[in-house]
Amino acid sequence: MIKNRPLSFNLKLITELTVDEKEALRVLRAAVYPPEVIANRPGRHIKWSIPQWRLLVEDGSGWLVSHIGIVTREVTLDDISIRIGGIGGVMTSTGSRLCNCCPSARRVFLR
């Protein structure tokens, strides 16, 4: 990715991902987390929740350059129901790591 290229942000439910978006995620995941990394990562034995939401970040040419998985839960705290959220499955392509994708994506998510 060329620095300063415009980024587009697309927040989608996991059930709304197209076949092309799923394939782009698979390609990004394979590039960011190759098998030898997955095989040795510290949390490999933990069963993680699958994020309900995906924030997809594409560069100006339409390439998926970053992804943030978003998990939300309704919880009760002191008899008050609130929604909490967390992120996981953060991935940014090697060539885009200095372009500010993740901080920009987090700002979009937090709006």
Image (spheres, rainbow, N blue to C red):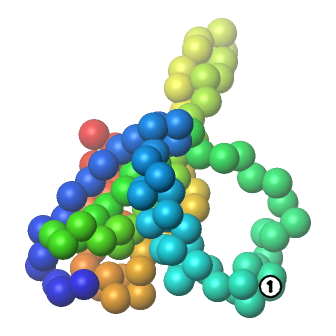
Q: In the drawing, does residue 16 fall left or right of residue 41? A: left
Front-lying residue, 66 or 109: 66
Name the residue tied to disc 1: 40
Q: What is the secondary structure assignment of the residue under circle 1?
A: helix
Which quarter of the figure has residue 72?
A: top right
Give the x, y percent position of residue 83: 53, 26
Q: In the drawing, does residue 76 fall left or right of residue 91? A: right
Give the x, y percent position of residue 48: 75, 52
Label 1: how many Cα within 10 Å (few below 14, some 14–19, many 20+): few
Front-lying residue, 44 or 24: 24
Which quarter of the figure has residue 2?
A: bottom left
Which quarter of the figure has residue 8?
A: bottom left
Looking at the picture, which amino acid does disc 1 mark?
A: Asn
The residue positioned farthest toward the top in the image shown: 79
Q: In the drawing, does residue 78 fall left or right of residue 42? A: left
Give the x, y percent position of residue 74: 61, 23
Q: Which residue is drawn at 53% across and 83% down?
A: 31
